Amino acid sequence: MKAYELSVLFHPDLEMNLDPSLDKVKKLIEVSGGKIVKEENDGKKRLAYAISGNEFAVYYYMDLELPAEAPAKISSTMNINDEVLRYLLVKTDERRTKAAAKAEEESSEEKGE
């Protein structure tokens, strides 16, 4: 399985009740054979340009591990989901991820001393 990053922009009206829409995305990932490693809700933010008449969106990020056929299945399903304004599913660079983890580990060791 390879490492991926999924960024999802949800419809701004879902800010107060994001759980059902988020559960659909998580279930889609699990059904595709993937695993969520890390997730982060970045909240409601103003968009750089209007998407479908919306000036704001709820930003949600996930680090995933997916099998080879999963990205195509996830993309095709996300394209027809009305609750998702935009999404971006990209393969992460393993070397950069390892370097960031190593740097974070070293900084935490320095703080501990």
Image (cartoon, rainbow, N blue to C red):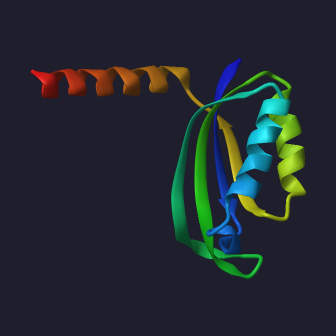
At horizontal 75% and vertical 27% (from top left) the residue drawn is: 34
- Where does the C terminus fall, quadrant-wise? top left
Q: Between residues 75 and 110, which one lies in front from this camera angle?
A: 110
Seen in the picture, residue 53 relative to 64 is either above or below; the reply is below
Q: Residue furthest top?
A: 1
Q: Residue at x 89, y 46 (%)?
A: 76
Outermost left residue: 113
Residue 70 lies in quadrant:
top right
Locate residue 100, reporting x and y percent.
Answer: 39, 27
Residue 21 in the image: above or below residue 45? above
Residue 5 percent across, percent down from the top left: 62, 38
Residue shown at 44% from the left, 20% from the top: 98
Which quarter of the figure has residue 26? Answer: top right
**Along the viewing direction, whichever of 94 and 59 lies nearer the viewer:** 59
Residue 107 percent across, percent down from the top left: 22, 27
Q: x, y (%) of residue 65?
A: 67, 25
Q: 77 left or right of 54?
A: right
Q: Nearer the viewer, residue 52 or 42?
A: 42
The part of the image, by quadrant, that contains residue 59 is bottom right
Q: How many marks?
A: 0
| 58 lies left or right of 70 | left
